[in-house]
Amino acid sequence: MGEDSSLIPNCTGITPLEQALSSPYFQYYEHLRAQLCTYLSPASIEKIDHCFFVADFAHRDQKRASGEPYIIHPIAVATVIAQLHLDVDSIEAALLHDVVEDTQITALMLEKEFGTTVMELVQGVTKLDKLRFQDYQEAQMENFRKMILAMTKDIRVILVKLADRTHNMRTLGALRPDKRVRIAKETLEVFVPIANRLGITEIRTELEELCLASIYPMRYRVLKAAVTRARNNRKEVVSSIKTAIIDRLKESGIDAKVYGREKRLYSIYRKMVNKELKFSDIMDVYGFRIILKDVDTCYRVLGQMHNLFKPRPNGFKDYIAIPKLNGYQSLHTSLIGPHGIPIEIQIRTEFMDQMAARGIAAHWAYKENGSKYVSTTSQKNAQDWIKNLIDLQQSAGSSMEFVENVKTDLFPDSIFVFTPDGTIYNLPKGATPVDFAYALHTDIGHHCIGARVNHRAFPLSRSLHSGESIEIITSSTACPNAIWLSTVVTSRARSSIRQYLKGLRSKECQLIGRRLLQNALKPDRIESLTDDKIALILSNFKEKTIEDLYTDIAMGNILTVSVIKFLDPNSHRHHELPVKGTGGMPFTYAQCCMPIPGDEIIAHLAQGRGIVIHNINCKNLRSSEKGPGKTLDVFWNIQVTANMEFKTGLVVELENRQGILSEVSNAIDVAGARIESINSDIKDEKNFIMTLIITVRDTDHLDKVIEHIKTVPNVTNIYRRK
Ligand code: MN
């Protein structure tokens, strides 16, 4: 052990299939392999053969709780993933998902052997495995689910995790009863809602069934026996109604698949608990599903069913026009059958049926001849999904709420972090340890002197990330630092700090201000400033005495950098920032005008928000705010910005028609820009106004993007967001 070469065996000279065949456990892999051969190319199968070989080698001496060889587990997880018809990367990640955690193989080795995407997927799953759910109260569960989504840049990580959990739930029997119940509860509270949110019904329903069986084994057995009995009694009625439906469709010459639909045990159980229905009330309803070619036929068939059986008042739901939040589409109708038998029919297209079963996973499905199918970054994947939803939404013409919800899930504006004892806090993106300290308690904020993140020292000014655990170090003699005002993002922290500074006796305030200025002046000393220079500073900043200047610095009314800048307009203390002239102070880009290289810019010293870079023509910056001490002249540092991307806002007005939104996003892709977020508003009956936040390199790049968007038919107007 220890030498890398012994961990991933050398297998030059033998084909991937020969490698796989050399494993004593090939028999377990054979079935998965056959399944993959039905939808993946021979080249992909070769990659997966090699992957199985490596995973098997790595887990060779490990056993599951059941005593079986460990490799059975990754193979089963990959099989669930294969049932969703996911791409090669997902299958490889499924086979390797426990390798980094449980064997000597490192992420680096995985990257070398299988590429960055597979390595990142495996690492994502490993990271989720480290979260401990069981300690949390129900009230925290919603936050927890959001955090999982926020931590996951690539949804495929969650799909592998869901598959992992599915197999673990199937094999729960090997564990102690108390452990079984704990895992089942966690599954029901965390993973089932996520599967539901992503629309992956196949996995969700299986997990629900398994959870019910583990948490309430007695109820499950009784219910199961009752359902089996009832199903047998129903057989004749089901087949006669089914025949009636099929005959009617045949008469009209409509091609359709008709299924008798059996309710899941878990859904029967929920209905009995929640709606206090009797078992017989639920089982007496006969469910059917009709799958058709296109949407028009769905509505036609709906009419025919209403003609065949009498519809129940208020028994109709149109989820085609108004999809459910997870993208589910179908027509639902309740009818009264022969002898008053209650009937429920779901009517949908083939595509909607796929979506209903696989949800988001349907979008990663491997396409043999998919011309445009690329699975580069997660961002791209998420965008593809959103694109799809927008079109879905648009063809349905219903409210934008749907897209809004999905957007907040995939581009969250929040981060979720822990206290050392595991309580979850929800903070805005960009929050620092100081924000966190004030979120805990004002006193903790006031006295904080440092932070440890994931047990390591962490600067108070740096942004936190989802999933991190934060410990605040306090000292009873410490007090808030005015400089924090330039890095905190929560209004709670900001106002607490300002409140404190205001309350300071002027003497202390002056001391703090003096210390701040001295820090900024380094290595020069305040004492070495000549009286003339000081007089100049005072008149420039309209201060009577140097003590007043110190006080304003402490209060955050004047930033030290503008004093330094005044003293030495050519000071270039830091060269590596994309904007020159801020004296190395941290800054942010204004959200109103979102400047990009090529724009003329100005730095504004916003009260309590530090330095903000605006477009020089920004309307939000009134002329009164452009006075001395309030603004700095700044310039783009072209050497640095050349390799960077910047966010900016674009408004596109367009005439509503099928597919136009995906054509617009496509045009943006082709121009090499990325969409960060989309908002749309209805202008009038025919027209939409879409506000996009996109990332571009500079104004030239933006012009190119605009040119591309203009080529999309029915785009009526396009301009920079002001
Ligand atoms: Mn696992």
Image (spheres, grey):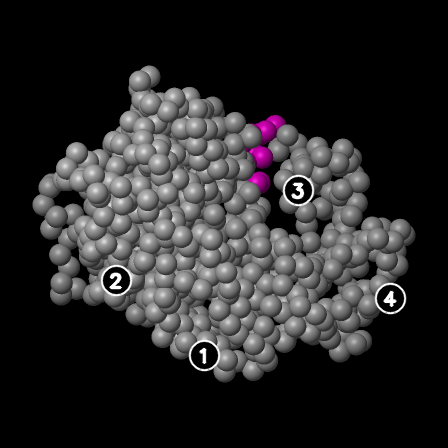
- Tell me the mark number nearer the camera, choosing from 1 and 3: 1
Instruction: Tell which of 689 and 541 is nearer to you.
Output: 541
> In this figure, what is the number of numbered marks?
4
Give the residue at x 39% y 23%: 504
Q: Residues within 10 Å of mark 2 (few under 14, many from 20)?
A: some
The three-letter amino acid code for the residue at tag 1 is His
Residue where numbered disc 3 is placed: 267
| Disc 1/disc 2 C-alpha distance (Å) | 28 Å
- Tell me the mark number nearer the camera, choosing from 1 and 2: 2
Residue where numbered disc 1 is placed: 708
Give the residue at x 86% y 58%: 311
Residue where numbered disc 4 is placed: 307
**Would you say residue 169 is visible in this rendering?**
no
List x then y, in percent, for residue 315.
Answer: 82, 53
Name the element at disc 3: helix
Instruction: Tell which of 454 and 629 is nearer to you.
Output: 629
Does the CB distance between marks 4 and 1 fall below 8 Å?
no
Q: Residues within 10 Å of mark 4 (few under 14, many from 20)?
A: few
**Would you say residue 224 is visible in this rendering?**
yes
Does the CB distance between marks 1 and 3 fall below 8 Å?
no
Name the element at disc 4: helix
| Disc 2/disc 4 C-alpha distance (Å) | 72 Å
The three-letter amino acid code for the residue at tag 2 is Asn
The residue segment tinted magenta is 208-218
